Amino acid sequence: MGDSNGMREVARAAGVSVSTVANVLSRPSIVAPETRRRVQQAIDHLGYVPSGPARQLRGLPSPIVGSVTLDLANPFHAEVNRGIEDGLAEAGCLVLACSTDLRPATESRLLHLLQQQNVRGIIISPAGPDPAQLLEVSRRGTPVVLLDHPKGELDLCSVAVDDLLGGRLAGEHLRELGHRRIAYLGATVDPGPVARRRQGLREAVGTILDVRMDVHPPSLGEAAAAAAERVVALAPTAVVCINDTAALGLLDGLEALGVRVPDDLSVVGYDDLPFARRLAPPLTTVRQPAYRLGFAAAGLLLEEGQPGHTHREVWFQPELVIRASTARIDGHRIDG
Amino acid sequence: MGDSNGMREVARAAGVSVSTVANVLSRPSIVAPETRRRVQQAIDHLGYVPSGPARQLRGLPSPIVGSVTLDLANPFHAEVNRGIEDGLAEAGCLVLACSTDLRPATESRLLHLLQQQNVRGIIISPAGPDPAQLLEVSRRGTPVVLLDHPKGELDLCSVAVDDLLGGRLAGEHLRELGHRRIAYLGATVDPGPVARRRQGLREAVGTILDVRMDVHPPSLGEAAAAAAERVVALAPTAVVCINDTAALGLLDGLEALGVRVPDDLSVVGYDDLPFARRLAPPLTTVRQPAYRLGFAAAGLLLEEGQPGHTHREVWFQPELVIRASTARIDGHRIDG
DNA sequence: TTGAAAGCGCTAACAT
DNA sequence: ATGTTAGCGCTTTCAA
């Protein structure tokens, strides 16, 4: 019993033509109730499932949206992806989640694969500094939405976070506590948003002492733990970390070194992940509305389908959350 | 200038037929070097990208694999998804990540959508208790791999974790510490794997006091924090939580209630997420190899393509990680 | 209200 | 080594 050509099969079973079956599926109202019923019954009976690829080949939009982030296991990005998923849900769309690990080559490969799959659109936190490929993808008809990235000159939609402000918030907080010798624990090559945070930090504190880690080791947390020694060697009174996960690892590393937080060293994270408030010590950090970023990006992407669409940019503000991992400097440090 | 029929366009530009272009793409070796070069050049020049849907319509497998989990923002599942992504990467496949929020209706809808998209296969931690639909999907040609779920009678591949053991490990640990009155903080309806943990726990400790939370509220953590009162009302000397995220929230709730951990109450989590070791207090928990589960599942799924495939089951063992959130009972409690 | 027919872009015989 | 051809399952005019 061939269930080969799906729709033809249904048509035969219902004693109608394929186009009638097609109509029952996409414009039920124009089909006579009785016919509609028969067709529907045949569909149920055969367990017929329409073919997405065939529809897409005919020009209908795919329900799949690509999400390209640094790492889908990173809790921040996972939350963003969930926001995207929910934002897409009512439109019946699905998230194809991809990690770049910050490698431009991987990003490029993913972009190619997604284009090839004819996705409805792509939401991306660009890893590569060069937006040319993104514009090219967009120009060829696949809508692209930038995430945690201001559109700048780019002719694209974007969801931006004021990263400069985020960095500044952290820096000002530390300065108010009397810190002058401030380190920054970042990646060997910071992605765009992170680079802007660092810049905001520098604007607020003047000089910053850089410690760079290779983000690839088993995990970012471990990389940060391993970097503790290098941080301490710089003799800062405070460290701002690339994110909460790094801060978590650093806290472990510092403990192993016998450095007390915040007594000997203040530590600031970024993102305000759920665990930040319950760490030992509770982590001072800069909150970003991860879920809402994703949700907004999904909305922008779906809008791109509309007739008279023009690119928009949606901004979000980060927020400083002060906890116990930062403290006023006592002045009894080597330098102050 | 129409870039309409992609391949035909390239063929014309290179002065060859479509099938030669197709050959350059899928069997370059059978094309004359010079011709190949010309075609490749035309491809690059036009920025031609092959159409996935068209290929799939012709019967080639889709590179997309569906992953259906409880919640892709949940750090445990996020890590699983990353394992899947990496396990799939060398085969050039991509993960379509979906959350069920434990709703059977959502699971069912997703399964339908994925089938319709003609995905290469589906990796799922079933939400619904009824495996009928999964078997049906598999029977219709979409490979299904069960994740954190023993295959049991099912004729499917699966990656299973010994959840019974996990629950037992937690229970035995608590008994050794002298605990007799043990609560279990679960969801109103536990998904399969979690139900098995609870069973293992009961096997080890005899009776357990149930506290059920609605998992839908803003977040599981908040639901757990809110449930603290109900836990305390049961006057247990220890609580085992559905997972680390719930334990995190419960810790907050307990603190607000003035209950000290582990002095007044021992707390056990599940998963051993990265933050568990650094909470206040460090959390005793049962570790699951999230990443490896996903990686293994991806491997099984890809194997399903092979000629003489037979369904396999891969087992993983959970591991008790003892930290400071559990302590020997002092005997000065109401009951012991 | 329903049916016939023309492709969407591609692959895989098969023919040259 | 390259070209011709017949569809894959569906949507969509257009005709009946």
Image (cartoon, coloured by chain):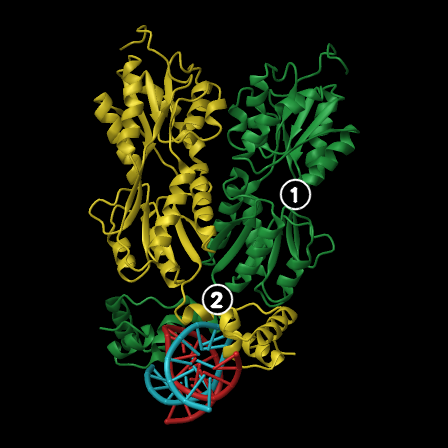
Chain colours: A yellow, B green, C red, D cyan
Label 2 resides on the chain identified as: A
Q: Residues within 10 Å of mark 2 (few under 14, many from 20)?
A: many
3D distance between C-alphas at marks 2 and 1: 31 Å
Report the residue at 77% width, 28% height from top.
B205
Amino acid type of the residue that numbered disc 2 sits on in the rendered structure: Gly
**Label of residue A257 in the image:** none
Q: Give C1 or B32, whichever is nearer the viewer.
A: C1
**Label of residue B191 in the image:** 1
Q: Residues within 10 Å of mark 1 (few under 14, many from 20)?
A: some
Q: Quadrant of residue B163?
A: top right
Picture quarter with the C terminus of chain A = top left
Residue B133: give x, y in percent of width and height: 65, 59
Report the residue at 49% width, 28% height from top.
A275
Question: Same chain, marks 2 and 1?
Answer: no
Report the residue at 47% width, 47% height from top.
A86
**Label of residue A52 in the image:** 2
Say whether residue A190 is visible.
no
Residue A238: give x, y in percent of width and height: 33, 18
Amino acid type of the residue that numbered disc 1 sits on in the rendered structure: Pro
Q: Secondary structure at mark 1?
A: loop
Say whether residue A237 is visible.
yes
